[in-house]
Amino acid sequence: MVDNEEIEEMLKEIKKNEKEGVARVSLEDLLPPDKKPESILVRKKWDLLEGRRSDGRELRSHRPLFIQLGTVSDARGSCYVEVGDSKVVVSVRGPKEIPNIKEYTEMCEIECLVEYAPFSNSKGVDEGYLCQALKKSLEPVLCRHEFPNLQITISAFILEDGGSVLSAAINGASLALTHARLPCFGIVTAVTAAVVEENIVIDPDFHEETLCLKGASEDSELFGLATLSYMPDLEQITFYEQNGCSNRHAQLFDSLTLKCQEVHKICSQHALKEAKKSVQCLVAAQDAAKSLRSLQVQ
């Protein structure tokens, strides 16, 4: 961390350079060498090569999941997912008629929207890519034939990107569809894995993810990043993407499939808990209606 005194010193240095007509510099340029992003990535690389992670996890351990359903009051279904520093809110709206439709469609159309909060770490992020990846992951999950000529909108609002944010959004969207009581073939879960030379790192944080993406662009044989979305009940893969490490498909598949099954158990528990709560509310409403009818004056 950089303390307040260091920040004040850096701001003074910037103002001094501006007065003296020196070329404009950023706060990043004035950071101590050991606190610059490049230094952080170098330390991450050596830690991972030695089997260490900054948060104390093992290389193939997933961060704890915090899940809360029904967080958006004006949506049909919603879910908040927190994985480490990654925080995502997903909402589902519809089905509604497809705007400006010109011909009949047998399959429901899924519209996916992904937006980063203004205060989130979104530098250089391609939101369009995340929209397409989210859509590809969810299209095989929803019973689209049940809603011909209609559209369902799934919106993911990323409050903070702490790594593996696409996986968090897919998991949240799948649970939001369940919370919306829309017919699905199952719950899809997603996990991201990074490759650092011989090590496979499950659920990378932001710096680990950045390290592997940068490394893949320089040496795709030693670094890589892969994301898998999987329905364990049907043993069906709905989405898979891999950057770098073209010779590690089998190992990545095995590791990701195993972790998807573990995450699926957690997501299923939350979906079941929400279903039980809904049934209890329905039974309570029916009992209240019976009581009111019994009190009616004949």
Image: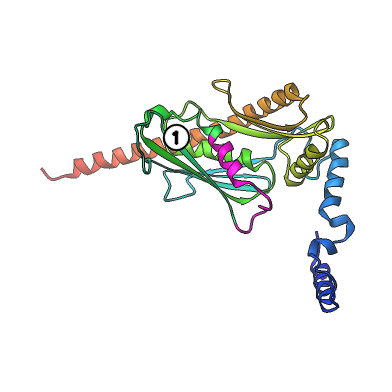
Name the image quarter holding residue 49: top right
Does the stretch in magenta take in 125? yes
Please tell me which residue is depicted at 59% across the width and 37% down the height of the picture: 133
Image point 47% across, 45% down: which residue?
Answer: 70
Q: Is residue 207 above or below residue 23?
A: above
Left-right relation of 61 to 101 = right
> In the image shown, does 135 or 120 lie closer to the viewer?
135
Q: Residue furthest bottom?
A: 19
Instruction: Write the residue at 76% across / 46% down.
Output: 207
Q: Position of residue 273 (x, y in %)?
A: 49, 36
Residue 218 falls left or right of residue 88: right
**Residue at 81% over, 41% down:** 53
Question: Disc 1 designates what residue?
Answer: 275
> Where in the figure is residue 287, as x and y percent of width and height?
29, 38
Who is closer to the viewer here, 98 or 68? 98
Residue 47 lies, in percent from the top left, at 86, 41
- Residue 54 in the magenta stretch? The answer is no
Q: How many marks?
A: 1
Quadrant of the image occupied by residue 188: top right
Please state the horizontal and vertical placement of residue 298, each as a whole percent of the image.
10, 42
Q: Which residues are magenta?
A: 118-135
Report the coloring of the rendering: rainbow
